[in-house]
Amino acid sequence: MAKHDLDPNYLDPNYEPVVNQSGNNPFQEVLAARLKRRAVMKGTVGAALASIMGMTLVGCDSDDDDNDTGSVAGVQTDLGFKAVPVSNANQVVVPEGYSAKAFLPWGTPITGSYPEFRADASNTGAEQEQQVGMHHDGLHFFPIDQKAGGNSSTEGLLVMNHEYINQAALHPTGATYVLGERPADEVRKEIAAHGVSVVHIKQDSEGAWDVVFGSPFNRRITGNTEMDIRGPVRGNSKLVTKFSPNGTETRGTLNNCSMGPTPWGTYLAAEENWHGYFANSNPDQPREQTRHGVGNSSRYDWELADSGADEYVRFDVTPGLGDPDTDYRNEANTYGYMVEIDPFTPEAKPQKRTALGRFGHEGVIFASVTEGKPVVCYSGDDSRFEYIYKFVSSQPYSAATAGGYLLDEGTLYVAKFNDDGSGEWLALSLEDADFAAKVAAAEGTMVGDINFTGFDDQADVLLNTRLAADIAGATPMDRPEWGAVDPNTGEVYFTLTNNSNRTEAQTDAANPQADNRTGHIIRWTEESSDHAAVSFDWDIFVFGGEQGTETVVDGEAVVTLDDDNIFNSPDGLWFDYNGRLWIQTDGSDAEPYQNNMMLAANPVTREIKRFFVGPVGCEVTGVVTTPDVKTMFVNIQHPDANWPFGTEGDHPRDATVIVTRNDGGVIGA
Ligand code: FEO
Ligand code: CA
Ligand code: CA
């Protein structure tokens, strides 16, 4: 079940509002695109066509042949396990010969005085600050010896995001209000249940994983941790707050969905649906808020904490009567970034890297690095009709000196997917002649529902990344979620989870389904396999859907989904170190799909098999393995009650599931 159906705070139709009113892709362009698409036949839609014609295609041939292998330069990416069926059981299902065990559930003590989790959820805010947060999401395993060039698969730092909370589960009796105010310790606990956990873990001689008690690396970063603003937006007048009169600092990171490990051993946490944490009761909102959907009340009402403490009132971004450094009118401008955390330096302040743009960052994925070449990373903006971005550093990569500074200077591009299978990266830089001309032409006009008055400077462009991408003419996508880069070919994959709002007139070749409820996965190859290139070739890897859904290339069905691999709403996406692609879902749990799941794909043959099914109510999000690909960590977010420990009346506990092969072999092989 999608989170929107589970958390009452997500039932608000404005939670993930359609805020792109730019109208990119005018009608005549669409018409031409469709005529062309018929001829090109790049990834047409069998199931959509079938449903339009009132047919259901069932029982098509399975391509699930165990002899299918994928081979690139001798690398085997075949899928050696037996697919698991769909399931509606309140437990994790893995293939025969595999085991699964819940680990690091919400509330596990990891720092400070290691306060024990209380099953009635009565832990205080201060205790939550020392325990694993809620609603686990993206995660990464850093080998403990990584800085020394090692590759440990038995000890490391597991770093994970805690995207949001379920207030009903977090407190003994849910969120409370007294005379319109919220008890401050409840608010403190909610803020502490967000953010990131860094957990030093180690395998014992029996192969069991546990937290390394007292490790200096164990750390909680929360919605209240002090952070620096870095890159072009640092010190901008629109970031001035009472807390940081010079606009260089802020407190907290929120709604951390996916992440990306950097080539230099740090962790970037994404800030996705941050807009919902702020309230602005002034109807005349700035474009930095309207283009994201900040409302007149916040999701959890933190600004109503009864203590009136500064760290809580800041979530009210209504302008006061004084100067900007006397209130928090600009607080929301300190959110919407990728946040760099160095797990190996526990005292290091997290750094918000503004050069990567400000939007609803789902996550980030780095291309592999080469000495002397720029660093390149990709990030999707997960809302309906938003965009896919790429950052190319100005300075070249050098293993000896690489660090976060590489992310502070460079060019942010946005993707335009042409209907003939080509694509372009459009620079969002005032130094780019094409972009500067489009900005000049747009001045004084309405861009969507924003009266565009120009950009002051490049920092203003980045602060308003979505608006800049509207002006550049980017392709509005069906909710870009995670990306992944094939370690064998360099191809870039992105999940487009769904978009029930897309009309027939708004379809294009890259988002070809109206009322897209099942999603698809797109992929591209950069020109000359150079990740810094400004053009690329794309195709659709697979369409989600029910049995019989076809992905057609050049008139031939290259994938036909069957009982072993039906899925909908692909979200998490990760290539393991051998090059198998792992696809996680956050979609409808109605028939025929049942609980959310994870599948493995062979990127060469497009063979796809269901590997894992989550418990009732959850989404399956976040996957990583140890370097030897023998221990897999999979996050379960927002499970139903009684999971994972099965006691009647339990508060549900998000957890990391450890998957291993009983014979100690490589996962998926
Ligand atoms: Fe947090 Fe877009 O999923
Ligand atoms: Ca997601
Ligand atoms: Ca999702």
Image (spheres, grey):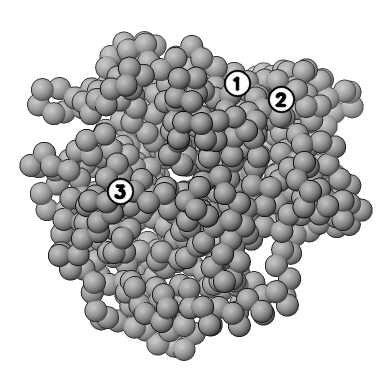
Q: Which residue is mark 3?
A: 579
* Residue plotted at (52% across, 41% down): 377
Give left or right: position of 204 versus 412.
left
Q: Based on the displayed image, in which of its 4 quarters is residue 509 positioned?
A: bottom right
Q: Which numbered marker is on residue 234?
A: 2
Q: Which residue is mark 1?
A: 227
Three-letter residue code for mark 2 = Arg
Against 447, is 180 above or below? above
Residue nearest the viewer, comparing 548 with 557? 557
> What is the secondary structure assignment of the residue under circle 3?
loop
Q: Which mark is first along the chain, 3 or 2?
A: 2
Residue 434, percent across and down? 77, 52
Q: Residues within 10 Å of mark 2 (few under 14, many from 20)?
A: many
Q: Which mark is first along the chain, 3 or 1?
A: 1
Q: CA distance from mark 2 to mark 3?
A: 38 Å
Against 641, is 351 above or below? above
**Circles 1, 3 touching at the beta carbon (< 8 Å):** no
Q: Residues within 10 Å of mark 3 (few under 14, many from 20)?
A: many
